[in-house]
Image: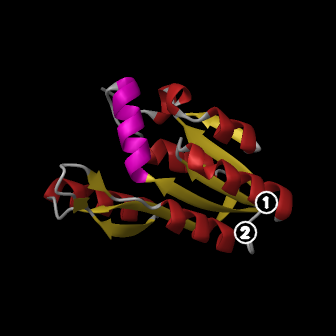
Amino acid sequence: MEKVTILVDAQNVYYTTKQAYGCGFDYNAFWAMATADREITRAIAYSCARGDPKQNQFQNILRAIGFEVRLKPYIQRSDGSAKCDWDVGIAIDALEAAKDSDVIVLVSGDGDFDLLMQKLETDLGVRTEVYGVPRLTAASLIQATSTYVPIENGLLMKK
């Protein structure tokens, strides 16, 4: 049985599905698809700690599905912009996971991950899958992965 590690950039998938479709990502449908006939070595969802009751509920749902939820503080800057960036954490976890995974699944459309996918594929011999919203996923990321799965239809919450 294939060993799989799942890494979800929850902020990215939240905003891209909302922008493209006006609805949310169906984590249960995704879990069923990404884990079918596979052994899960680790599943991590990366998010922000805002202390918001609705977000806390969402994080508990992720845990109930089977995700480990990793949180960073949500930082509101004086200029009004905000920050909660997990790119380095995701990259480190992916490189660590390559030691005992056959496949690494990344849920994100962020083009910054293209080099990571290339490294996993070419240098570490791990197959990669990227799930992302079609028109909001970087072309370089799609090209860098073994398998690209568009987030659409069955992976979206019903409106």
The residue singled out by tag 2 in the image is: 98
Q: Residue at coordinates 76% horizontally, 52% vertically from top-left? A: 118
Q: Find residue 28 and report its horizontal and vertical position in percent.
A: 45, 47
Q: Residue at coordinates 73% horizontally, 58% vertically from top-left? A: 103
Q: Find residue 158 and report its horizontal and vertical position in percent.
A: 34, 29
Which of these two is toward me, 96 or 156? Answer: 96
Q: Main secondary structure of the magenta part?
A: helix
Q: In the rendered image of this protein, does residue 97 appear above or below residue 19?
A: below
Q: Find residue 145 and report its horizontal and vertical position in percent.
A: 73, 44
Q: Cα distance, mark 2 to mark 1?
A: 6 Å
Left or right, 79 with reference to 89: left
Residue range (magenta) = 10-21
Residue 52 belongs to the span the image colors magenta: no
Q: Residues within 10 Å of mark 1 (few under 14, many from 20)?
A: many
Are the two marked residues, 2 and 1, in contact with CB atoms closer than 8 angstroms? yes
Q: Find residue 80 and report its horizontal and vertical position in percent.
A: 18, 49
Q: Earlier in the sequence, mark 2 or mark 1?
A: 2
Q: Which SS class for mark 2?
A: loop
The residue singled out by tag 1 in the image is: 126
Q: In the rendered image of this protein, does residue 42 appear above or below residue 116?
A: below
Asked if residue 19 can be seen in this view, the reply is yes
Count every numbered label the image shows and give the total: 2
Q: Residue at coordinates 59% horizontally, 64% vertically from top-left? A: 91
Disc number for residue 153 = none
What amino acid is found at the position of numbered circle 2 in the picture?
Answer: Ala
Q: In the rendered image of this protein, does residue 139 appear above or below residue 40?
A: above
